[in-house]
Image (tube, rainbow, N blue to C red):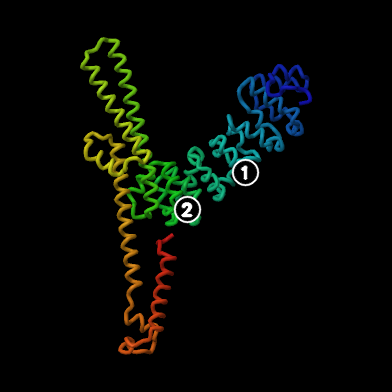
Amino acid sequence: MEHFQNTKELKIEDLRKSNMYPEDVIEKIENQDFSALENLISSSDRENRDFMEPLLYAVKNEYNTYIIFSFLGENLQNDVELALEIIKEEPELIKGTPLSKNKQFMLESASINPEVVKYMAPELESDKTFIVDLYKKNNLEITRYIQNSNSIENLITENKDLINDKAFMVAAVAIDAEALKYASSDLKSDKEFIEKACKNNHEVIGYIASHTDEFQKDGLESAKNVLVDVSSNDAISGFKGESNRIKELIEKQSDNNSTKEDLEALLKRDKQLQRHIKFFERIKNGEVDPVRAYRLISKVCANIEPRYKEQIENILSLNSAIVKKEKQEDMDIANLNSKKAQITLEDISDITGSVKLSQVEEATKDIKAQVIQKIEKDINKGSENPDIGDK
């Protein structure tokens, strides 16, 4: 700055000493009568950075507010670097400014302080493409401010392509697991999508476990693997927490000269917990078949916490669905091979046209070869373009 070397450290007394500002402006600021500044500062001064920026920071340092930003000229309010600094603490000051209409700025600033989306210009709020871009930021705080007037269901209703938009649907199910019902068949078969969705929102796993028919084997496998990891971590964390509490009790018991039996009981429980921890660490590391392990746990352990019980049930449900899908795939392959091997008189008649069925048995080897070629071509064509249902 021309008049101040450390603008961001100024105090109001520094403004007075500079003789840059009319006394009535200083007085109104000291009295925190900021609204009066609208009539005291000219439009040309509002566009003058050397004049306005010292006011901005002096007021901030004295009264902990960037309120002077509201009185800056339009060009100064368009300063992105300054505005990004402002929205960190007072996003409401962006309301009505030129930047509140700027898509790129609002997208960038939303990542810094999600609350800023509350103060976007009305034209952005009604811009569905922009709202979808905000969803794709995959930030729960951002979507919390926009989903009331721009729900996932409404956005998808207006733009059917969104059901196959991976970035949008990942964000959507992070907010609401039930949104997975809108995802296309392609996405429900996409391992990467399912894995991200499950990791971002563990409730998605419960949805998949309750709607296994909607998903292909790969998607079910992804959900099961994520849940095994989640449940193992939860169990390990829970057992470690209990172990730490027991160690504290042992120390207290020792200090209070507790009975030998009490201490032995605590030590016995801690050893049991250490075995549990190692067991679940082996499950997590793939050293133990998780399905067999959880099936055994569900049968042996009588007092499983509801949350863990639900996780185990979902793992077993997902596994059953996977096995069912595998059996169906084996049956489809067997039927396909069987169909390739069968040549009926009707098939040959399709090729020979006017040849009577009674004469077909005497058809030449060339005609039979044509029949086989036609059938295999039709079968292969069907394999390349399987019917995956409505998208």
Instruction: Determine the CA span between mark 1 and mark 2.
Output: 23 Å
* Image quadrant occupied by the C terminus: bottom left
Q: Position of residue 255 (x, y in %)?
A: 30, 10
Drawn side of residue 290 relative to residue 45, left or right: left
Closer to the camera in the image, 48 or 244: 244
The circle drawn on residue 371 is none
Closest to the observer, 151 or 368? 368
Which element type, helix, strand or loop, lies under badge 2? helix
Residue at image coords 28%, 36%: 306
Tell me residue 390's x, y (percent): 41, 61
Q: Position of residue 177 (x, y in %)?
A: 40, 45
Would residue 232 appear left or right of 62 to someone viewing this image? left
Q: Which residue is mark 1?
A: 104
Q: Quadrant of the N terminus?
A: top right
In terms of sequence position, does the residue under pointer 1 or pointer 2 come before the other? 1
Q: Quadrant of residue 244?
A: top left
Asked if 339 appears above or below 167 in the picture, the reply is below
- Label 1 CA crowd tier, 10 Å (few <14, some 14–19, many 20+): few
- Numbered mark located on residue 156 in the image: 2
The image shows a total of numbered marks equal to: 2
**Residue 69 falls in image quadrant:** top right
